């Protein structure tokens, strides 16, 4: 297998599912017909080149008791950088982008289960501090898809059937929370990347992975996987396509759009008099032309006429939320 082909196959596999076992790179190597050392060397190289952003657990924010929303602010051009810095300082902001629209700053906002301010008040405080002219809060009403997987192999079909998920009920224990804190950290690229965690927690591998699988089966953990730096991986364009969909057609069209492999996120959100779009589908491609063509195909298939394309022009912040972190409390105390 050529180096480039092996890298692309490796990236695709690690994005889909990273093995939660004692020696995961050995498992990956066996699947690729390679060696553990060769895989480790390649992953370290991809990490150094910043193509691999992070390999860790991806958790369901709401199932952990956090309240969250997508938020858009309208900020004067000369105040954008200052506003972005103020927004980024909140530990519940995981993504923050400048987009080509009057509502120019778009960020995801979450507050902890024990937040005294709550989501709405926190957004209000940020709106005041940034001197935003206006803001819209766009919580998820219905989620059709959340699956960021870049097609590094070029073999992925244009459309994919979405799996119906069923989850077991779980009551989180202190042991579960300790494992969540460990699994949310970026792994070290070593033969046994989970070894330090089990030693710190005083757990056996068997117990550690049993708890991790309980979190996965309950839907608290969506998956354990690698996230790429899209642009470094060759996917230079991402557009947040937004659609005005009649309420009675929202669910059917949302499911159809979510089947496009290039769509990583697809949600129904509220609409407002100043924001008519209620269906959001994030599209990723190598070029803006590819993005535009995909969105045009989605428009033709759905029959929708009123839609927009919001391209990100600056990435102010992109990182995983750190759950059960004291930084949330510290931010709120600083507001008192």
Image (cartoon, rainbow, N blue to C red):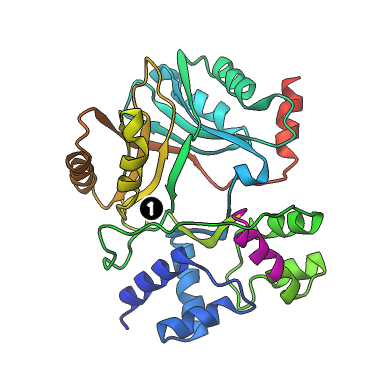
Q: Residue at x 17, y 41 (%)?
A: 300
Percent x, y of residue 158: 25, 58
Q: Which residues are magenta?
A: 210-220
Q: Can residue 237 be seen in the rendering of this structure? A: no
In this view, 117 is above or below 228: above
Q: Nearer the viewer, residue 179 or 6?
A: 179
Residue at the far front in the pictured view: 248
Q: From the image, give the main secondary structure of the stretch colored magenta.
A: helix
Q: Quadrant of residue 266?
A: top left
Q: Nearer the viewer, residue 174 or 96?
A: 174
In the rendered view, would you say 167 is above or below 307? below
* Figure quadrant of the N terminus: bottom left
Pointer 1 residue: 230
Q: Residues within 10 Å of mark 1 (few under 14, many from 20)?
A: many
- Does residue 15 belong to the magenta stretch? no
201 left or right of 72 in image: right
Q: Position of residue 189 (x, y in %)?
A: 57, 70
Q: Position of residue 22 (x, y in %)?
A: 64, 78
> From this viewpoint, is residue 229 visible?
yes
Residue in the foreground of this view, choosing between 187 and 307: 307
Image location (x, y in percent) of residue 243: 30, 32
Quadrant assignment for the C terminus: top right
Please give the name of the residue rendered at 53% of the width and 32% of the height, measured from the top-left corner: 69
Task: Please determine whether, in this image, residue 289 is positioned above or below residue 33.
Answer: above
């Amino acid at each position: 297998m050529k180096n480039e082909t092996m890298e692309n196959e490796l990236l695709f596999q690690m994005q889909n599912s990273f093995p939660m076992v004692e020696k995961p790179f050995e498992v990956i190597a066996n699947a690729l017909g390679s060696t553990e050392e060769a895989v480790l060397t390649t992953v370290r190289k991809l990490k150094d080149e910043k193509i691999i952003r992070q390999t860790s657990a991806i958790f369901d924010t709401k199932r952990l008791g956090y309240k969250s929303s997508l938020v858009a602010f309208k900020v004067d051009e000369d105040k954008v950088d200052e506003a972005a810095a103020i927004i980024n300082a909140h530990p519940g902001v995981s993504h923050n982008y400048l987009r080509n629209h009057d509502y120019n700053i778009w960020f995801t906002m979450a507050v902890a289960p024990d937040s005294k301010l709550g989501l709405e008040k926190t957004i209000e405080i940020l709106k005041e501090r940034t001197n935003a002219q206006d803001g819209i809060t766009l919580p998820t009403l219905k989620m059709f898809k959340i699956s960021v997987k870049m097609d590094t192999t070029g073999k992925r079909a244009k459309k994919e059937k979405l799996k119906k998920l069923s989850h077991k009920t779980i009551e989180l224990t202190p042991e579960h929370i300790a494992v969540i804190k460990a699994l949310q950290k970026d792994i070290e690229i070593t033969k046994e990347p989970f070894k330090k965690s089990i030693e710190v927690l005083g757990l056996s591998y068997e117990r550690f992975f049993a708890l991790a699988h309980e979190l996965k089966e309950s839907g608290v953990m969506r998956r354990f996987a690698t996230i790429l730096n899209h642009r470094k991986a060759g996917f230079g364009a991402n557009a947040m396509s937004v659609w005005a969909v009649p309420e009675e057609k929202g669910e059917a069209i949302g499911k159809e759009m979510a089947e496009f492999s290039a769509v990583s996120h697809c949600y129904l959100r509220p609409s407002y008099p100043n924001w008519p779009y209620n269906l959001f589908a994030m599209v990723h491609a190598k070029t803006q032309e590819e993005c535009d063509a995909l969105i045009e195909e989605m428009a033709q298939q759905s029959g929708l006429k009123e839609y927009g394309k919001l391209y990100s022009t600056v990435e102010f912040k992109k990182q995983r939320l750190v759950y059960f972190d004291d930084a949330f409390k510290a931010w709120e105390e600083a507001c008192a």
